[in-house]
Image (spheres, rainbow, N blue to C red):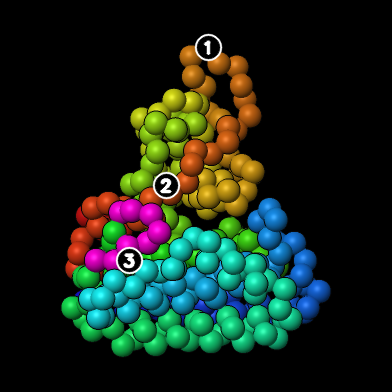
Amino acid sequence: MTVLPTLRAELAAATDRFIATAAELDDADIAAPSLLPGWSRGHVITHVARNADGLGNLLTWARTGVETPQYPDPGRRAADIEAGAARPAAEQRADLVDSAARLAAAVESLPEAAWSARVAALRPPPHPAWYVLVRRLRELELHHVDLGAGYTPADWPAAFVRRELHDTLTCWPYGESTVGGIVFTEPVDEWSDLGKGPVVRGEAREVLAWLTGRSAGQGIRVVREEPGATREEVPPPPPWLTMPSPADLPSAPPDTYPEESP
């Protein structure tokens, strides 16, 4: 048994939740601003649909061995999102559902050996194909919040939060860190030696929301300042996930991800 069945189940549930929220939006809702600066909800939904197709391209690469980029180029990606953002709600929903179904079919039909194939995002490093499922879950959960339609970081599943915090720490930008450490109140944990800055404290979902730019630091508190510092406000977060995946992922799908503590 590998982590694949778990990730597939999480992906199906996250997809259903996102589609259910989108289904409640009418044309005016779709045209309204999202929580992402400069993007309407239509931009967010179109991006999630095109992301499904892009990640499907990576699974095609894994299945065939023929290099198939996620997107032809960054400019095409942006143009496709802009072109689709103003569509009516019904057209947006249909595209969202159809693109998710195409990705689900690609996931379901991928041969076992192909999950270990190396594929590449727009930025390095390459990663094994099984990590495509993790990346898709990240897109769905973060952008579901970005819709600003009732789904918040408090609704994130615990498994998603745990996995994203693990990958955030694995990819931590030490040279650009704004904090020296993070103390987690729930679950109890502590990250230390992160770089220069104060030590802050918060619950896991609150910390992840802050680190990913999905909150301004609500629930985060400074608990230890740098020597000589007097600032009490929470600093801005460091750059988040500067790589699309950790660099040392196992090629074959592991039994769990991240690995559970003994």
Q: Residues within 10 Å of mark 2 (few under 14, many from 20)?
A: some
Task: Name the amino acid type tagged 1.
Answer: Gly
Residue span colored magenta: 118-125
Give the Cα separation between the discs numbered 3 and 1.
Answer: 43 Å
| In the image: residue 139, left or right of residue 120 | right
Identity, as a three-letter code, of the amino acid under mark 2: Thr
Where residue 242 is drawn, which disc sits there?
2
| Camera-nearest residue between 108 and 203 | 108
On the question of residue 73 being in view, the answer is yes
In the rendered structure, find residue 228 and report the number of the disc placed on it.
1
Residue 120 on the magenta span: yes
Q: Amino acid at mark 3?
A: Tyr
Q: From the viewer's perspective, is residue 18 above or below residue 262? A: below
Asked where in the image residue 54 lies, by quadrant, the reply is bottom left
Left or right of 152? Residue 101 is left
Upstream in sequence: badge 2 or badge 3: 3
First in sequence, mark 2 or 1: give its number: 1
